[in-house]
Amino acid sequence: MYTVPFLDLPPLRSAAGTVRLPGSKSISNRVLLLAGLSAGTTVVHDLLDSDDTQVMLEALRVLGCKLERDGEALHVTGLGGRLATKQAKLFLGNAGTAMRPLTAALALLAATQGGDFELSGVARMHERPIGDLVDALRQLGCAVDCLGTEGYPPLRLHASGQALQAAQPIRVRGDVSSQFLTALLLALPLVAHDGDIAVEVQGELISKPYVEITLNLLARFGIAVRREGWQRFTIPQGSAYRSPGRIHVEGDASSASYFIALGAIAADGEPVRIEGVGTDSIQGDIRFVEAAQAMGAQVASGPGWIEVKRGRWPLQAITLDCNHIPDAAMTLAVMALYATGTTRLSNIASWRVKETDRIAAMAAELRKLGAGVVEGDDFIEVTPPAALRPAAIHTYDDHRIAMCFSLAAFKGVPVRILDPKCVGKTFPDYFEALFDLVRTPVEAVPVLTVDGPTASGKGTLASAVAQALGYHFLDSGAVYRATALSAMRIGVAAGDEASLARIAATLPLHFVGGDAHLGSENVAEALRAEDVGAMASKVSAWPAVREALRQLQLSFRRVPGLVADGRDMGTVIFPGAELKVFLTASAATRAERRYKQLISKGIPANISTLRTDLEARDARDQNRSVAPLKPAQDALLLDNSALTVEASMEQVLTAWEQRRPFG
């Protein structure tokens, strides 16, 4: 997951390939709660690993459930409807799928078995209404206190000292969030011992497909809810949770929407294939496929898979009642940027009570890109501009805004996603999955180079800058040392140019967290050996080796961007780099740094000798006939003799920001 403050997406051209979806958030947290309330052990496969499921898992641990990992499976030993812990404070982040059902379940258990629980979350969770659920629970006789603003978390749930009043139907509003009804349906089987318990929905129920998920999963755990349309639901007398033993979580259909849209926008050759969800899905958001087809997507699908290609182009604007796909409908608002005409999405009032006010947020960010937007209480209209403007997208700590606006980068301009780590709520590896599918002209991928003499600190600086930007990192010195190490291991001599070039041409080198790997082996320490460095100096003099390694180094230029350090990155390898830095430091400073480095490894050294060696190497490098050490004409010259790495990085990032189009 990208944890950088922002992630810049270059202009992207096309997409193809296969993505495997993470598990559904809606299914994952429902399954976890049901397993936690049931007797016995439930083995859960393909569970989503995200912020929302982590807070649910932690809540279950605190409440006394036993959770054990067995490879990719999670074994959940439930409470059997009995409280093991009767007092706890639970922090539930911004997870509505944890806050709402846990509120209902713990309110009922506290009322019938005695207990005292406090439920809280992040600041935004305390702004998300829960009053309709609280009112329904109070009808039953549960003691629910709002500890801040009435009708909002944080909440205290405790024993009321009176019997539950379940003889009359429980009334709950359905026009704000379907999660209130879902919470009651998940919790009421805990107290259906003496008679049927009915729930009546007041007003038009929104997001009906999410209630369908709830009913489907309740059935898997032994609860057969009787339903009269969408207005009345009855939990039969004697209902009790029974573990299904094993259960698989299907891929997240809401997350599938981004890749369905990606195929419709950018798969102009081979399709984008989505695995983990398909025609057999129990999630309502699978109907996003219909909306994408209406806009022009070509779709093929089957059990557990969907394939999407570009069909009609440009896409066709649509007018759609989105009650059946409230979360996925956000993706349509960005698809509208690629459509002819105005797209109108209605019946989306629930957007306003989600992780943020999504109608206002989508309108604001679409306007930054140049789109014409009209917004209302429960609708949004989007008209695409003639040409998009580069924009920095504020994500409001909302995973869906970050993911759907990433698709705007396919219209010829770079797009900055602020706080990309917010995707951790449902899809931590979203951007990695996206980048595995996208294709873009190599010249569109931004490059920043850091060149300089030996021991100037260029590798440390370049690695830090790459981490700060979320870009790939290329240590060109490691490229030559890895070639030398490979040659030494198989006995190739330093004078055998042809054999060395063959080794260089097939070098399986990549970088992980700044460390160099040859295949699966981390060779970072091996490359620092003195004899490897000496061999690398000889290897780098051969033109055939340099040309073979030039091609390897060019291959590191991949989305979203590259930071490369070395001796000729800005002059030979990437002469068109957007920012070239030439890092210098006095020979005395570099000798002192090198001395400390060697002493820390237990290697004896002499500062005077080191300084003499560095000055001699500088002279050799500057007078080489092939790629001599020199700054590019347009390089930023940075002397870091008196600067920390952090101060040097700040100067480089400031210069980089001045070259970005985001203002």
Image (cartoon, helix red, strand yellow):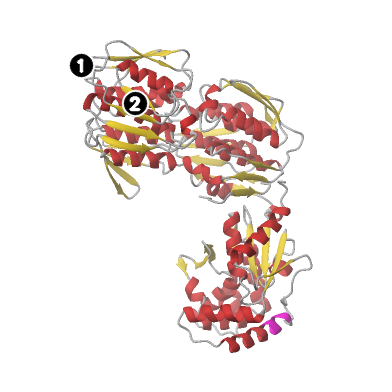
Mark 1–mark 2 distance (CA, rounded to whole Å): 19 Å
**Quadrant assignment, res 61:** top left
Residue at the far front in the pictured view:
148
The reply to whether residue 248 is in sight is no
> What crowding class fits label 1: few (fewer than 14 Cα within 10 Å), some (14-19), or many (20 or more)?
few
* Residue 547 part of the magenta-drawn span: no
Q: Amino acid under label 2?
A: Ala
Residue bounds of the magenta highlight: 618-622
Residue bearing the label numbered 1? 194
Q: Is residue 130 above or below residue 399?
A: above
Q: Is residue 632 above or below residue 176?
A: below
Residue at the far right in the pictured view:
633
Q: Amino acid under label 1?
A: Asp
Of residues 98 and 260, which is closer to you in this image? 98
Q: Secondary structure at mark 1?
A: loop
Labelled disc at residue 104: 2
Q: Secondary structure at mark 2?
A: helix
Please tell me which residue is depicted at 33% across the width and 11% down the height of the picture: 169
Rendering coords of residue 149 (x, y %): 45, 26
The overriding secondary structure of the stretch rendered in magenta is: helix
* Residue 619 part of the magenta-drawn span: yes
